[in-house]
Each structure stands twice: as structure tokens, then as C-alpha cells.
Amino acid sequence: MTTAVTDSTIVQSSRLNSRIPDAPVPEMWDHCKNEMKLVSPGNRRKYDIIVVGTGLAGASAAASLAEQGYNVKAFCIQDSPRRAHSVAAQGGINAAKNYHNDGDSTYRLFYETVKGGDFRARESNVYRLASVSANIIDQCVAQGVPFAREYGGTLANRTFGGTQVSRTFYCRGQTGQQLLLGAYSVLMRQVQLGRVKMFPRREMLDLVTIDGRARGIITRNLLNGEFETHTANAVLLCTGGYGNVFYLSTNAKACNVTAAWRAYRRGAFFANPCYTQIHPTCIPVSGDHQSKLTLMSESLRNDGRVWVPKSQGDHRPPPDIPIDDRDYYLERRYPAFGNMVPRDVASRAAKERCDAGFGVGSSGKAVYLDFADAIKRDGLDAVKARYSNLFEMYERITDEDAYKVPMRIYPAVHYTMGGLWVDYQLESTIPGLFVLGEANFSDHGANRLGASALMQGLADGYFVAPYTVANYLGTHGSKMGKVAGSEAGFESVLGEAKGRVNRILGVHGKRTPNELHRELGMIMWDYCGMARNAAGLKTAIGKIRDLREEFWKNVLIPGAGESLNQTLEHAGRVADFLEFSELMVQDALNREESCGGHFREEHQTEDGETLRDDDNFRYAAAWEYKGDGAQPELHKEKLEFNYAHLAKRDYKS
Ligand SMILES: Cc1cc2nc3c(=O)[nH]c(=O)nc-3n(C[C@H](O)[C@H](O)[C@H](O)COP(=O)(O)OP(=O)(O)OC[C@H]3O[C@@H](n4cnc5c(N)ncnc54)[C@H](O)[C@@H]3O)c2cc1C
């Protein structure tokens, strides 16, 4: 059903120029590329580019820019780019190749992504993403990424949530690892050629702007504690998502908001920070000892059926519960998509059943994901061939054999759709600061469809930034003066970064950063998690402020700053989470509607579905830092839908 929008109240901010090309949506990217400035091969070596982060977005961007001939300096926290969080991605990567001949097309991938994100993404960017998706697969195959293949040798595909076609390319349950090895190999080729200088074990602590442009970063060497300044003509942030603000999430432990948050404080607007993705199929929390949660890939919903007992308190072993006593609630509520509804829908439905008392397991906070029918239909070997490493992982953690008893799963924090605001060229509100991958506010609106994060990270790195960064340098490069890193602008930011670390070391309190982080996570989960309401969000703001005060009075850091000190590293990240979380809650409070992963209890339909308010909230919320203790300013980017018709999201029929 198409919805009517009067859009009387949304005023586009004059501070946000999205630079959407003046062309029909399908032609925008070609039009843009044709108009962009180039840098001649001989001049490229005159320019330095900093790439912070070497996950899929950063490694692909660094390698591509170096391949063009720029001098690239690449930074990461880990000892090797191979250990970026991207390595954890399991299920797959989308591309509109239509190998299954089942009705897929660029338009369909575009439309499903816009719809999946509840019409809160910029359609021009999403169309570009869908159209370059096919190139990504070709690029990765050429690098030797071992995608699963059919018997005849063609690449295999499976289905992911929110779609009715098979367009997800995969390498068993290790797609991220294999794609990262591909990107790593092209990155290392450039390291060998001398065009990329790799700085592992460095943490970016701040951004330096000179004459209003991003010209460098301040890093800390995590092995010896030394502070460093690095200069460049452009800076690319590819630092991933901030799901760990919730403490418990499926993200790698090092995922953080520090680089993005520091850039925000230097003038980059932060967009839609409240949009968090809660993934429906994670191994449930088992106790207070946990510091991390484990994802069971969405691909499992291709064959696993989700159910709970029809009666509350039915504790019979699952195989003993007859079919008539089971509630396959996703198939019942959403017959058109069944178990393959998008993540936000599946997560809320699981929470609804558990809150109503139908949950299983000792905590009652779990539902079954059952493979018995698939095993009966396709055979054990076929199911093993598709998912064996995921079943092994499940068994190692729970000591249960999911080939024999259903998995128990529950939603958990997984991905953040919010991030630094960028225009069509992926440039932030700070000229020369580009933001790629999960770190930008991305193409996923209020909810990301499965297998689309890898697609976006690699689209940004291999196919968008190489053009747009060149355009920036071609336009402004020759007018930029040289910077040496000793200018006053660098010195003062360096002093601030050192001061912050010393301040943390000087507290000498009694509580570990981990303890404080866990407490923050509980506040965020309880008040800004799967469901939010105004009263809870206001309570959260007070609690966050109190906890922030407690941190600066009572944090305990054993050891010193001049050597490897992971507690100190963690403390710096927690300090930034404690500032950032307030903005997140503020954004959730401002958005008086429900859309995608942002479910405001006050705004729901009679049957508990999200109730969007297109008239008043069809915008991306971009927040501007106005100083410590001051209210950040909200700027609105009005979202126009000229090619994807604005519609009510429906997965029932
Ligand atoms: C368990 C799991 C499974 C997933 N499965 C899928 C899937 O099947 N398909 C899909 O599409 N998506 C999946 N995702 C999402 C996807 O993996 C991520 O969104 C994506 O990999 C992010 O890539 P990135 O390059 O933006 O960031 P990351 O891979 O997180 O890389 C961030 C980089 O930034 C560096 N960094 C961070 N902060 C700093 C700093 N301050 N200074 C210096 N360096 C810094 C890190 O060292 C790292 O190199 C999954 C996510 C999880 C958690």
C-alpha cells in the first residue's frame, strides 16, 4: 500500500548538502562519475591519504587508492588487518546477479533495501549500492575468494531475510573471513609495492582539521604508549560500528565509537545514532560472566523453523511436543515471508512471545530454531554441507547437538545503522573527511537487511571512495598547503589527547572499566534496546550522566601508559561510549515514531507492528556537537522517494 505524505513540517537543513546528482536515480552514479574531477597519474603520488581501519571497508579502500598511485597510510587497532571485526561475518554478501533466474534485479535489491530500512535511507545511495553489487562479486572472485558453488561450477546463492529471491553469495559460514583475506591480499600487495604504509596496533584518538579541512590524526601506539601525529590530504574513517555501547553484543570486543565520536566533536555530524540492529538468532545470555554474545547466522533461517510451545510453561523436551502444540509464530503472523522476515520484525516477534510467557529454556528468554523438517526433507548431509561450522560453534558453546534438538536463540545487539553523516560522495560535514562502511550512517535506513553490510563496506571501498576521494583531491588538492604535523592545530589536539589519557590514569579509583561498561550496557539495553518509550529514555539520560561522573571519579587502571595496557585502551573507549550513549538516547527520544530497529512503544499498530510517521519524521537526523554540556543541534535531511514508492512495510501478504 502506498502512503500519502504531506511533508509540511520537515524543513531541510541548509547545513546538509547531500550532493545528490541531478539525473534520474538509475543514471545518477554514471552522471556523477562523468562529472567528477580526476587526478593525473603523475600527480597522484603527491597526495597522502590516511585510512583509519582495515576491515572490509578500509582494506578495500586503501588497496584501491594505492593501486591508483596515492600514498596511503593505513591504521588499525589489531596486530594485523586480518583480525578486523569483518572477519566474524558469517552468512553472506548480497548481489543482484539473478543467477537463480528467480526474478531478481538491481531495482529489486534497491527497493527491498529501501523498504527493509523502513524508508529511512537515501534512495540515491541505495540505488548505487544495488547497481555496484554485481561488480563486488566479480572483484572478489578474481581475488580468489572461495564462494560456494553449485555442482556445475556456478556460484551458489541462498536467501536472506526481507527478500523472496536467492541473491546471497557465501563461503559456508565464513564469508567475512574469506572476503577479508581477499581484501588483505590486495592490501598487502600495495604494502609490498611501498604505496601503503601499514600502522598496526595504533588507535586513532583524535582528528586534526586545518583551515576547516581534515588534515591528519593523532594516534597512540598501543604497544609502547607513544603518541603520534600523522598528516594527509584526506582522511578516511572506516572504523566500524558502535554496537558495543550495549556491552553485550555480537561485535568483536575491540569495536568502538572513539574515532567517529572524536570526529563528531571536531565538526562531523552524527546521523541517526539511535538506529541499532538487534539480530534475532543469537545464542541466549547464560549469566553475568559473559562479555560477548555469539551470532547464529541468519542463513540458518533458510532451513530452520522458529517456534515456541503453544502453552505457557510447557517444559517437555522439544521433540516430544507434537506439531499441533507448537506455534510457528513467524509463519503464522507473516505468511508471505515466514521465517525469512527481516531482522527487526523477527526480533520483536521473539521478544513478544517471550514477554508473553511462551519462551523456552531456563530463563524463558529463548525460542526454538528447529532443523528437524529440513533434515527429514533434504537429509542430514545436505544440512551439514550448508551449515556444519555453525552447528559446531553452537555445540561448543551450549554442549547441545542441534542436529538432534532445536537450537535455542534470542535477539541480541548486532549492528549499528547510525554513524557519521555523509553525502552522496561519502564525505562528512568536515571537508576531506570521508566515512566508509559501518562507520557511516549508511544505506540501511532504520534496519539493515542481512548480507548487506559486507556489500556496503566493499562497495564503499572498492567502487565509490576511489572516485569520490580522487574528485576531492582533483578539486582541492592543488590549493591545499602542505602540513608538517607541527602546526598549532596539531599541537593542541595532540595535547588534548595526551591530557585525556593522563586524566584516566590519574583517577586511581576502585572500579574497572569493564564493570562500568557492563553497567552502561544494562542501561542501554533496558531503556534504549529493542523497545523504547519516552519515560524510559529520560530515565536513561539521568543514569548515563551519573555513570559518567562515577567513571571520572572512580575508574581503576592498573599499570602505566608507556606499555601495552589493554585496561587503559578499554577505559578510553568506555569514556567515549559514556558520552556517545547520551546522544543515542537523545536521538531515540526525538524520533517520535517507530521505524525499523527503532521501536517506540507509544507508536505501534494494534497488532504490535511499527507505526511510522512519514509526515513528521521522514528525515535523517544529523546531530551537531555544540560543546560539552550543551544541547547538540539537530539538522534534518529530508528523504525524498521518487523512484522507490513510499509504502507501508508489509511482510504478511
Ligand atoms: C557475528 C557477525 C556476523 C556478521 N555477518 C554478516 C554477514 O554475514 N553479512 C553481512 O553483510 N554482514 C555481516 N555482519 C556485519 C559486518 O560484519 C560488519 O558490518 C562489517 O564487517 C563492518 O566492516 P567495516 O570495515 O565497516 O568495519 P570493521 O570490520 O569493524 O573494521 C573496523 C576497523 O577499524 C579499526 N578501528 C576501529 N577503531 C579504531 C581507532 N580508533 N583507531 C584505529 N583503528 C580503529 C579496527 O582495527 C578495524 O580495522 C556481521 C556482524 C557480526 C557481528
Image (cartoon, grey):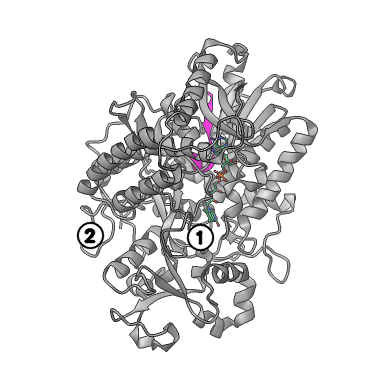
Between marks 2 and 1 in the image, the one whose residue lies nearer the viewer: 1
Tell me the kind of residue under disc 2: Thr
Tell me: residue 188, above or below residue 308: above
- Which region shows up in magenta? 431-439
Task: Return the residue at label 2.
Answer: 605
Secondary structure under badge 2? loop
Where residue 169 appears, as percent x and y from the top left, is: 61, 59
Relative to the observer, which residue lies in front, 471 or 538? 538
Q: Does ligand 1 reach within 8 Å of label 1's beta carbon?
A: yes
As measured in the structure, the alpha-carbon distance from the residue carrying label 2 to the one carrying label 1 is 32 Å
| Figure quadrant of the C terminus | bottom left
Q: Tell me, yes or no, whether the highlighted magenta stretch contains residue 90.
A: no
Query: Does mark 2 have its CB less than 8 Å from ligand 1?
Result: no
Quarter of the image with the N terminus in it: bottom left
> Is 651 positioned to the left or the right of 107 in the image?
left
Q: Residue at x 41, y 59 (%)?
A: 288
Q: Which mark is residue 294?
A: 1
The verdict on residue 436 being magenta is yes
Please provide percent x and percent y for residue 557: 48, 37
Q: Nearer the viewer, residue 200 or 108?
A: 200
Compared with residue 290, is residue 470 higher up or lower down, i.e. above or below?
Answer: above
Q: Residues within 10 Å of mark 1 (few under 14, many from 20)?
A: many
Residue at 31 percent across and 29 percent down: it is: 632
Q: Which picture quadrant has residue 158?
A: bottom right
